[in-house]
Amino acid sequence: MLPAYYQFYCPVKILSGDNALGYIPFEMTLLDVSRAMVVTDRGVAGAGLLSFLEAAFADSDRRIGHVFDEVPTDSSNRVANRLADLFREQKCDCFIAVGGGSAIDTAKGAAIVLSGETNDLLDLQGAERIRKDLTPLIVVPTTAGTGSEATRVAVIFNEENNVKMSFVSDKLYPRVAVLDPRMTLTMPPRITASTGMDALTHAVEAYLSVQKNPLSDAFALLAVDLVRRFLVRATEDGRDREARFAMANAALFGGIAFSNSMVGVVHALAHAAGAVGHVPHGTANALLLPWGMEHNLDVSAKPMAELSFHLGGASGFLDPKEQAESTISLVRNLLRKLNRISGLPLRLRDAGVGEDMLPAIARTAINDGALLYNPGEVTYEDALGILQKAF
Ligand SMILES: NC(=O)c1ccc[n+]([C@@H]2O[C@H](COP(=O)([O-])OP(=O)(O)OC[C@H]3O[C@@H](n4cnc5c(N)ncnc54)[C@H](O)[C@@H]3O)[C@@H](O)[C@H]2O)c1
Ligand SMILES: [Fe+2]
């Protein structure tokens, strides 16, 4: 059934495959920019990944102007401001983010500051507040999870208020996403598992969202299929190039899906658990996903049932609710496998969250914009109940 009305937009040019990085200088020529600010973090730089990027510039008249490698886990408003200052000082004219969601969203945050619309990022928080075109951004993801290389979203930690701020605007789409199989091979197993579950959560929540549509569904299902086939393999053997590359595509497809249909209760709770308890984003989504799905079971039985086949379940159930329950069991099986292989935490208590933090997480979550797209209503009591089950 088609929705009565829908929109779909993805203006990102995608370069995916062997030596994709090699095309970046040419893309800069097409964008008419010449001096890039590379945005990354110490973990990515320490894994030696920048050498591949530098090699791509060897025979080019385009330049890496400066490398900023001080992105913390979860980008923050202060770091985005500092990066914007440095960008001006170094006279750069585009960003190349090389890293996971933290590096990518820091570049997005700095680009918002540079647009000159405000001196304070807080002013532009929320949906559709950014009016100006932003500094061109080329993204090279090194995790396979957030999909931020193809989303109209930036998630930035507000150090003053201890909340994760979401920025949503078509202006935040990167110009080019570069999926190069060399860039995720060094990701440790635990981060592989947790970021891969972020990709799955995007796909599942996009597929259940009130704003789902045939195009976001198509991308969501592609992502779910790839995660089912390749996430365990990539976690077990990080050098498995086929699995790594498949997961990079899964994350991209999940990003395209949720950028259009948005996410729901699992992300609302995960953002809050990240802000209050500093739980890594992928880990929070992983351990909350089955509980969030259970909460939505009655209102979303049909689409949730459809996902069971894509997660490797048998077909032939007659009752959608029964089949939707089997979808949740398949997610739980996957989580147990990932826990055995990588130590991915399965409970909030094992991810550094104290029981006394649950009310604050629930309070923060019910103000998260993601809840607008969740298929069922979520009250404070519901949020707290889900957190208690996941504790
Ligand atoms: N904008 C969006 O659309 C969107 C969507 C989902 C999540 N997010 C945000 O993204 C952030 C999380 O991003 P993430 O999960 O990608 O993690 P991350 O960027 O925080 O990286 C996690 C860790 O992995 C290391 N790492 C990354 N790639 C590596 C590699 N190839 N080899 C070795 N180490 C590597 C990093 O150094 C870092 O220590 C959160 O702030 C989350 O809210 C944004
Ligand atoms: Fe996410």
Image: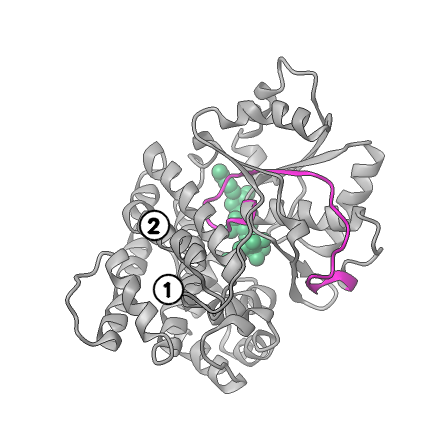
Tag 1: amino acid: Leu
Where is residue 261? Give x, y as percent: 50, 62
Relative to 241, does residue 236 appear above or below in the rendering? Answer: below
Relative to 15, does residue 174 appear above or below in the rendering? Answer: below
What is the tally of numbered marks visible in this picture? 2
Q: Quadrant of residue 390?
A: bottom left
Q: Quadrant of residue 287?
A: bottom left
Quarter of the image with the C terminus is: bottom left
Report which residue position mark 2 lands on.
227
Residues in magenta, as a range: 123-149
Q: Is residue 157 left or right of residue 386?
A: right
Q: Secondary structure at mark 1?
A: loop
* The magenta stretch spans residue 19: no
Q: Mark 2, mark 1: which one is toward the viewer?
A: 2
Q: Is residue 114 left or right of residue 191?
A: right
Q: Quadrant of residue 295?
A: bottom left
Report which residue position mark 1 lands on.
346
Q: Secondary structure at mark 2?
A: helix
Distance from mark 1 CB to nearest ligand 1 atom below 8 Å: no
Crowd band around label 2 with a 10 angstrom C-alpha radius: few (<14), some (14–19), many (20+): many
* The magenta stretch spans residue 141: yes
Mark found first going from the N terminus, 2 or 1: 2
Crowd band around label 1 with a 10 angstrom C-alpha radius: few (<14), some (14–19), many (20+): many
Tag 2: amino acid: Val
Q: Is residue 315 left or right of residue 385?
A: left
Mark 2 in CB contact with mark 1 (< 8 angstroms): no
Where is residue 349? Give x, y as percent: 44, 70
Q: Is residue 335 visible?
A: yes
